Each structure stands twice: as C-alpha cells, then as structure tokens.
Amino acid sequence: MSDTHPKRFSVTTPLYYVNGLPHIGSAYTTMAADALARFHRLRGAAVLLITGTDEHGQKIQRTAEQRQLAPQVHCDEIAAGFIDLWQRLNIQYDRFSRTTSDRHTSIVKEFFQRVWDKGDIYLSQQQGWYCVDCEEFKEARDLLPGQVCPIHTHRPVEWRDEQNYFFRLSKYQAALETHYANHPDFIQPDGRRNEVLSFVKSGLQDFSISRVNLDWGIPVPMDPSHTLYVWFDALLGYITALLEPDEAPTLENALKTWWPINLHLIGKDILRFHAVYWPAMLISAGLPLPGTVFGHGFLTKDGQKMGKSLGNTLDPVELVEQYGAEAVRYYFLKEIDLSRDGDFNETRFINIVNADLANDLGNLLNRTLKMALKYCEGKVPSIQSADIPEDIPLVQLAKSAGAESAAAYERLSFHTACEVALNLARAGNKFIDDQAPWSRYKAQDLDSVYQTLYVVLESVRLAAYILSPVIPSLSTKVYQQLGYGVDFNDWQALQVLQYAVHHQWGALPPGQALGQPEPIFQKLELASDMA
Ligand code: MSP
C-alpha cells in the first residue's frame, strides 16, 4: 500500500428528511458513498460510512400531523424504511445517525454553547418568505409568480415576521474565502465550487437559527421559547454519528478519532448549507474543517424532473425487488457521471446491465472457464504472467487498469472506474475471438492456448476486482469461479486479498483449481414484458 492512501477515511451521506419513504435521490447518494467506502476498505483503510435521518422541523411535524401520528412514531416508522432499503441495496454503513436521539441533543447543546460563548449568536427580527419543503428562507427575486418556490411548486411559500436568533455568518466571509483559496479541493466538482465562490463573493448575510411557534425540534438552550432551526441541528448529526455506541455524548468524545470527516457527499441542492454555513459554524466553534464537500448532480426519469405531484417517481424498493441490487447499483454508478445530472430510463437500464454484466463480463468468464475445463483440467494454466509478451494489447490495457481505476475512484468518477473494467472485458472478448484457442487446440499449439486462457482469465479477475466496490456480490461470484474462497461483502476476511497484488495485472496463481462455470448474471427483462 502506498503512503499516499489515507489510513482512515470517513464519509457521510446527507441525513435524509423523514417526510416520506426514501426516494431514488437518497438511494443514489447512498450507493455512491457505499461504493467509495468499499473502495477505501479494499485498499486497507479503516473506514467510517455515516448515514442517517434528519427528523426535526416544520416539514416533519406537519407530515406527522397529516398522518395523525405523534411525530416520533412517524419518524421511527420512516427511519425503519431507510434502514430496510439500505439492507436491500447492500449498503455497508457503520453509523446511522438520527437527530431525535438524546445523544444528539447533548451534542447540539454543547456546540450551541461554544458558538454562543464566541458571541456569534444574537436576537433580531426575521422577515421573509419561507419554503417549508426546503426548510429555508427564499429571496423574493428567486420566487416564481404567485410566491412559489422554484423547487417546490405545489404550494406557496409562507410569510414570516418573527424574532429569531441569528448566526453571524457575515463575520466569516473572509475566513471562508481564505479556506476555499488554500484548499482547492474543499468544494467539488469545479463547476459547483465556482458557484459557491461567486455566492460568497456577493456578500454573506447572517442567517436565523431558531424558530418560534414550532414544537418539533431542540429548544434553544438559553431561551426555550425558541426551537433550533432544523439545519443547525441536522448538520451536527454528522458529529453525533462519530460517537462510539456506548460513549458519553460529549464533543470531545465525538471528535477524538474520526474528525475531521474526509468527505461529505451530497446533492447539489444542499451545497450552500454544507460548503458555506457548516464550515462557518465549525470555525466559530473552533473546529477543523472537513476535507471535501462533493455536490452530485440530479436524476431525472425519462428526461423529466421527478416528483410526487408529477406522478413519475421511481421507487427504489420496487426497482431492487424487480431487478436486484447489483443491477441497480451498476446502472446508477456506471451510466451516470456523479458530477453531472443523469437520467433513468428503464429500457436503457436493462440494455446496459445486460450488455455489460451478462454479455461482456459474464459470457467471457463462462466461455473461458469452459475452455479451461476442457483444455487444461479446470485449472489456471501454468503460465507465469511475467513470461507473457508485453505487446498484447489486452495485457497493455490490463497493466494500466489498476492505477487508472484507483485514480477514478479517488475523484469519485465511478463511471470511469467501471469503464476501465468493462474495457478489459471487451478487449478480452476480442482477444479470445482473434486467438481462437479452439483451433489452436486442434492444432496442438498448447502453449498458445494456455497463454490465451491465462491472459483472459486474469483480465476477468482484474475487471471483477475493480468493479467490486460497485457490484460486490457479482465480483464475489467471479472470484469464486476463478477458485478463490472470498466474499467481497466480508471486508475483514477480504484483507487476505492484498490490494497491492490484486489491483494489478498478474495476480491469478498458475495452477489454481477453477470453480464450476455458471452464468453470473441472469439477463433482465423489462418488467412489463415479464407478466
Ligand atoms: N435533510 C437534508 C439534509 C441534511 S444533511 C445534514 C436533506 N434531505 S433530503 O432527504 O431532502 O435530501 C437528501 C438528498 O437527496 C440530497 O442530497 C438531495 O440532493 C438528494 N436528492 C433529492 N432529489 C434528487 C434527485 N432527483 N436526484 C439526485 N439526488 C436528489 O436535504
């Protein structure tokens, strides 16, 4: 393992609102965070993947009222729905942070006290248009005709004129600008970084961090007639999550091992909270800042914005039930560039996973294993990888694939990492067709047959290893058929596969007994064709 790999890596998803069951947007961020966490575990780092739920505020209170449920009962039910989906999607999270936990209240109070002692909180009058769905005040110029929030068009924003506590964000403008300048990777991707820089440059205003006439939340410690603004509370959920399960809930305990968090992975709509408000709150409290905030793009369905009112939502639970977790994970991470907006279309989804996983990768493994069974007694041919001519294009491709895919994972370019692996499978298919080992076998040119089979089996192995953070269960099937007793979902056992060896060309041991060839991936059929 090179010294440049972090030994510890902590990554967060947003803490999702529990106003409804998880939608495909929340599933998307969580799949990406899980793939990244798995990549770092593969490389031997100690990893903490944090997810959870954001349960306070007006939006949740109203949803519970509509359902005629006590807010906590409502939150418990929806939080369970998130946990259920993460299991179905094979998400290996380490912490599930809920903002209604008592531990969280203790952390919030201690943090609030620090910021208060710094003199960064004051009482003043707040007037403005509030979007309950965004849980955010909106500038009048940003609203659509009829006082409608451009993101939540189904109901108008509400006028508020009340006393609130404010956080002195304006005081931190220069400190933030210095941080952005000194840490060019703090906000990613670059386009989003530029948006934040110009927003900050235009001048920062203090923002209100309390509400009156709201019960569902944490009371402001020095004035319980106010409830803490849901975002001030929610962001601190990232810190609460760092506590060990049985540890006393103090900031000191929470911060001692995993802070600062390496990466906050979020959608582009909540970038300002994470890249401006949050770091200013942390500077005020005297804490170091997280490494990176990455704002990913938005998903559409069949080219249309998704929404309940539009009636075109995509239910992640249904999708997984229909097609399985591996296909869903693969499509969203391989087909969509995380840094851009992306689209889901069911026909394209099916075509892509069938072409890549069943045909290019699955068939290649299957046909090669069958040949190995026939031509070399079901074993990896006894060829030393060092003896294989360097000028074979597939070998050249394979030699750079490990480093290329690792660099892609590091910059959260999952689609590039997958493409590197798929290129190996495609080149493997071409190589085997060109070499036609079946004819060479007939001609008793056994050296050539062994060489071809070794090169192809090793390329499939490498492709599966590279893909394992994205499709761990399929990669496990490939490895098992290649004769390894390994499970990519059992990361502690996985440490036997040394990263330094397995992410490079030439790891497949000559003479290793191969498993039985079985198709690794059943082709999908469009749900409507299945009836
Ligand atoms: N509760 C806040 C986050 C607090 S973090 C301390 C929140 N929750 S959310 O449930 O509304 O949003 C969660 C995530 O889903 C956000 O990252 C958001 O960008 C993402 N998405 C919501 N709709 C989306 C798409 N259509 N496409 C991709 N992601 C989208 O915000």
Image (cartoon, rainbow, N blue to C red):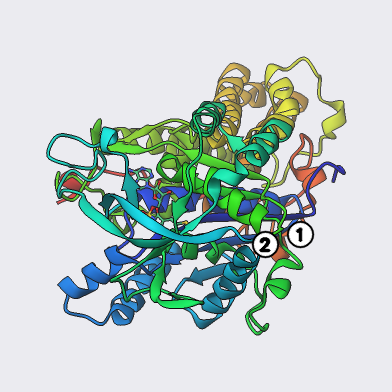
Q: Is label 1 in a helix, a strand or a loop?
A: loop
Residue at x 45%, y 51% (from the top left corner): 207
Q: In terms of image quadrants, where is residue 245?
A: bottom right
Up-down: is 226 above or below 374?
A: below
Residue 342, picture quadrant: top left
Marks 1 and 2, how far apart at CA:
7 Å
Residue 337 vertical placement versus 427 (above, below): below
Tell me the kind of residue under disc 1. Gln
Query: Which residue is found at the position 32% from the left and 69% from the top?
Result: 212
Instruction: Name the spot of residue 401 as percent of width and height, x first.
Output: 69, 30
Q: Is residue 399 left or right of residue 102?
A: right
Q: Nearer the viewer, residue 441 or 288?
A: 288
**Residue 6 in sight:** yes
Please state if 6 lies on the left or on the right of 154 as rendered.
right
Left or right of 367 on screen, residue 145: left
What residue is rendered at 28% in x and 34% in y? 142
Q: Residue furthest front?
A: 124
Between 121 and 401, the one nearer to me in the picture: 121
Within-10-Å neighbours for mark 2: few <14, some 14–19, many 20+: some
Where is residue 496? Give x, y as percent: 78, 59
Vertical arrangement, residue 235 with respect to residue 439, above or below: below
**Label 2 amino acid?**
Trp
Disc 2 secondary structure class: helix
Which residue has dot 2 on it? Answer: 491
Q: Residue shown at 73%/17% (left/top)?
A: 392
Instruction: Name the residue beneath numbered marker 1.
Output: 495
Residue in front for this viewpoint, 67 or 427: 67
| Mark 1 neighbour class, 10 Å CA radius: few under 14, some 14 to 19, many 20 or more | some
